[in-house]
Amino acid sequence: MGLFFVWNPGLFYGDKNIPKRSYVLLIVTTVLSLLWFVAGWKDGIAVQGARYNYSVSAINFVWIIGLWVLFGRNWKAESSFRSNLLVHWLLFAWLAWYAFPFFGEFI
């Protein structure tokens, strides 16, 4: 939770602009999340099972698409404080819950 406020301290002041570093964070974490799924898929099937892997990957895909749509809307149009807060809350919720799931041992 602390990282959420450290990342965008403008939220304390009602800032309506989404910082460019948040767009970069979305790009980098999307790529890293996809690499995480590729690297851990085999272990995930062995340890967690196919149903878990497919469910988590589908949920992650929905999160990624939703975040890209929200960030894209705010890139073109002028954003508001509410949209800035929502976009960042969703970004950090995704990072905490589904961006890098546990697939099993990576040894």
Image (cartoon, rainbow, N blue to C red):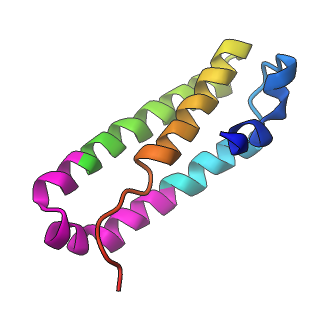
User: Residue 72, can we see it?
Assistant: no
In which quadrant is the N terminus drawn?
top right
Residue visible at 63% across and 32% down in the picture: 88
Toward the right, the furthest residue is: 13
Q: Which residues are magenta?
A: 31-55
Q: Residue at x 34, y 43 (%)?
A: 61
54 in the magenta segment: yes
Residue 81, image quadrant: top right
Residue shown at the point (74%, 30%) measured from the top left:
18
53, above or below 38, in the image: above
Residue 103 coordinates in the image, percent (x, y):
29, 65
Q: How many marks?
A: 0
Horizontal arrangement in the rendering, residue 26 relative to residue 45 (left or right): right
Give the residue furthest to the bottom: 107
**Residue 31, how many percent across, how many down?**
49, 59
Which quadrant of the figure has residue 11? top right
* Predominant SS along the magenta part: helix
Quarter where residue 82 is shown: top right
Residue 20: in magenta span? no
Q: Is residue 76 above or below residue 104?
A: above
In this view, the residue in front, 17 or 5, is 5
Residue under the point 84% across and 28% down: 10
Question: Residue 91 appears at what percent x and percent y?
Answer: 56, 37
Residue 74 horizontal side relative to residue 44, left or right = right
Quarter of the image where the C terminus is located: bottom left
